[in-house]
Image (spheres, rainbow, N blue to C red):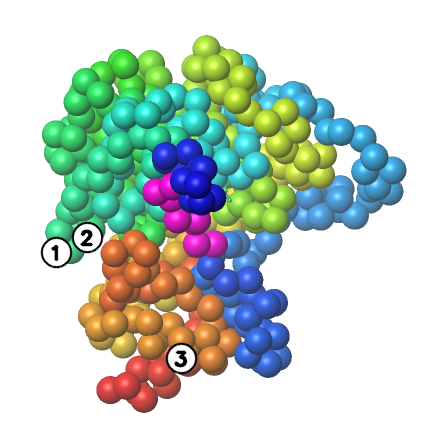
């Protein structure tokens, strides 16, 4: 028997998540002085100054110790910030881990897992990996207000007595599109109580459209609602890998059975606790991103490109021709963008909203690359 057949049935069908390029590896390969990394939706504004100072002040004597498995301080900081019970919080090694943990915990072989076409890639991987049956809801057309976004009616029609888990991202990566409050509330009312619903809010802090609901305000509608968020984006702590889920305490207690005990390390706990308290920093990041996103979108549209509306720290761009040669040419010019072939969008690239000088470098390179191919 070969090694493929030894893997569990779900794993046999799986392809590993594509994490994008490591900037330093690609920089060395290309022999360039620097790379502008706009492929991973990171936060160029960085973390709160209080986080930097606290980490710099440590003497690392505690490197020999296991972290607090219950992450008491961090959970208290999150609970205080969002006015929830600390027992409602599950911490993850990034929210990515939580998305997978939820499927591992609730999905048995044959259970249906509903998510959108062009939805965040981890949804499908988690569904398949846990032996579930992926139910991919066709996206909305490109022509509407939410181009290629999640279709609330399609989601409702995809529900069945076999539905065990529903994943949706608000706003969604990579499309940048969002669910409106009324549509999401109406959908949640229809989801049977034999299913768990995940609202992935990795980009929540960037939202500035009032019609995009805070998932936490919807928790009365469905008893098994889980809202996931992360310190990787607006808090600027992607390297520390910390995310959190908020659900009912009873649901969190079930997740606790499968969570790896020490999945959030000590330095991540210290940093995230301080990051959560620095609301002024997050607000500065939100405001800066919002104005830069509007500026970058306008500049890209002025190049004749189709730019999707976005509530995140990135924009999806449709070049309306195969985007791979454009991505490669940009890479050779030192700009990392995210290809979208794996999302079924081979004519698109996803571009992180960077700092102004990064965005200017991007635009200058793109003008040359598009002119070469005109
Ligand atoms: C929609 C969405 N959810 C979750 C994640 C996972 O982020 P992390 O594991 O860093 O919290 C990402 C990362 O890009 C994302 O785009």
Determine whether 298 is above or below 111 in the image: below
Frontmost residue, 117 versus 110: 110
Q: CA distance from mark 2 to mark 3?
A: 27 Å
Badge 2 vs badge 3, beta-carbon distance below 8 Å: no
Q: Is residue 364 above or below residue 311?
A: below
Residues at discs 2 and 1 in contact (Cβ within 8 Å): yes
The answer to whether residue 305 is above or below residue 214 is: below
Residue 289 image-quadrant placement: bottom left
Give the residue pinned by disc 1: 143
Q: Nearer the viewer, mark 3 or mark 1?
A: 3
Q: Would you say 172 lies left or right of 84 here?
A: left
Q: Is residue 41 visible?
A: no
The quarter of the displayed image where residue 58 is located: top right
Image depth: mark 2 or mark 3 in front: 3
In the displayed structure, does residue 328 sit left or right of residue 222?
Answer: right
Q: Residues within 10 Å of mark 3 (few under 14, many from 20)?
A: some
Q: Which residue is mark 2?
A: 147
Q: Which residues are magenta?
A: 12-19
Residue 218 x %, y %: 32, 22
| Residue 99, x across and y down, in percent | 43, 34
Residue drawn 42% across and 34% down? 8
The residue located at (81%, 38%) in the rendering is 63
Name which residue lies at 19% across and 18% down: 161
Circle 3 residue: 329
How far is the residue under mark 3 from the one under mark 1?
A: 29 Å
């Amino acid at each position: 028997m070969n090694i493929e057949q030894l893997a569990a049935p779900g794993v046999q069908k799986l392809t590993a998540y594509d994490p994008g390029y490591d900037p330093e590896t690609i920089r060395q390969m290309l022999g360039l002085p620097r790379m502008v990394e706009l492929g991973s939706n990171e936060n160029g504004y960085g973390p709160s100054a209080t986080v930097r100072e606290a980490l710099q002040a440590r003497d690392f004597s505690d490197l020999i110790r296991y972290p607090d498995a219950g992450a008491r301080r961090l959970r208290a900081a999150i609970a205080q910030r969002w006015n929830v019970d600390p027992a409602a919080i599950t911490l993850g090694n990034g929210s990515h881990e939580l998305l997978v943990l939820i499927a591992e915990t609730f999905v048995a072989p044959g259970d249906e897992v509903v998510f959108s076409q062009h939805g965040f890639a981890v949804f499908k991987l988690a569904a398949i990996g846990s032996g579930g049956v992926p139910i991919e809801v066709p996206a909305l057309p490109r022509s509407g207000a939410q181009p290629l976004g999640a279709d609330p009616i399609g989601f409702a029609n995809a529900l069945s007595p076999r539905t065990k888990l529903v994943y949706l991202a608000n706003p969604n990566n990579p499309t940048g599109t969002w669910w409106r409050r009324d549509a999401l509330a109406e959908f949640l009312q229809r989801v049977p109580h034999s299913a768990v619903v995940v609202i992935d809010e990795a980009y929540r802090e960037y939202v500035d459209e009032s019609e995009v609901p805070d998932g936490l305000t919807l928790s009365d509608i469905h008893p098994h609602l889980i809202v996931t968020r992360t310190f990787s984006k607006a808090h600027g702590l992607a390297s520390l890998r910390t995310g959190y889920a908020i659900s009912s305490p009873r649901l969190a207690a079930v997740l606790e059975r499968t969570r790896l005990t020490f999945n959030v390390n000590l330095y991540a706990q210290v940093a995230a606790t301080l990051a959560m308290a620095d609301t002024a920093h997050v607000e500065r990041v939100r405001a800066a991103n919002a104005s830069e996103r509007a500026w970058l979108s306008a500049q890209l549209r002025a190049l004749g490109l189709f730019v999707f509306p976005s509530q995140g720290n990135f924009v999806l761009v449709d070049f309306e021709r195969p985007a791979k040669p454009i991505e490669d040419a940009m890479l050779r010019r030192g700009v990392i963008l995210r290809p979208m072939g794996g999302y079924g969008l081979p004519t698109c690239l996803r571009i992180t909203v960077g700092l102004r000088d990064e965005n200017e470098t991007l635009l200058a390179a793109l003008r040359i690359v598009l002119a070469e191919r005109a």
